[in-house]
Amino acid sequence: RNPVDTCLSCFMTLFNKGIKYSYDLAELGGYYIDYARLMDHWRDVLPGGAFLDVQYEDIVADQEAQARRITGFCGLEWNDACIDFHKHERSVRTASWAQVRLPIYKSSVERWRPYERYLGPLLDALGDLAPERRIIGHLRFQRQDRAVERRRCEPEPRGEAAPHPVPAEDVAIDDVEG
């Protein structure tokens, strides 16, 4: 999953215990960098095919093909329940409890973009892992047919606040990340 979307999801979730780093954008970015380095290490030292990289955006784009890819990698037979996971009534006790009751949805892809102006410490910490910024200081950059057009940003409305952690149980289903 896009590193910024992943980190924003963590930042906006009030976890039960032990994940205090997720409430500081720069520290969260540092943890993500450590995760990325660890994954690079495993890719370097384990034989090819020891694990499967799966991108969230690929699942959103073609859930069934990715689910078949994952089950095939694990040596499992296909089961339609893999794409109907949201219909299962088992107990879920994680921060994503509401999400598992919904089909795959696209609203979490690039969810960080509206918050970009507040995510400077995270984007700086992520460095090369962060997608291209559209807002740099007070200038916004927009891609148009591979050309970059620069224009002044509109002033921020008064009272607009940065995203902040909220208790998972207080998040409306429309606000929940995938």
Image (tube, rainbow, N blue to C red):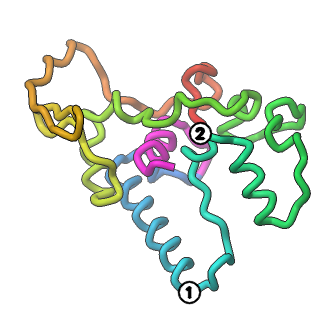
Compared to residue 108, the image places residue 121 above or below, namely below
Compared to residue 23, the image places residue 113 above or below, namely above
Labels 2 and 1: the sequence-earlier one: 1
For residue 114, side relative to residue 149 (left or right): right
Q: Callout 2: helix, strand or loop?
A: helix
Give the residue displayed 74% in from the left and 43% down from the top.
64
> Circle 2: is it few (<14), some (14-19), or many (20+) Cα within 10 Å?
few
Kindly identify the amino acid type of the residue bearing the numbered disc 1.
Val
| Residue 176 numbered tag | none
Kindly identify the amino acid type of the residue bearing the numbered disc 2.
Ala
For residue 173, side relative to residue 107 (left or right): right
Name the residue beneath numbered marker 2: 61
| Residue 45 numbered tag | 1
Residue that protrudes farthest toward the front in the picture: 145
Give the residue displayed 39% in from the left and 35% down from the top.
112
The magenta segment is 1-17
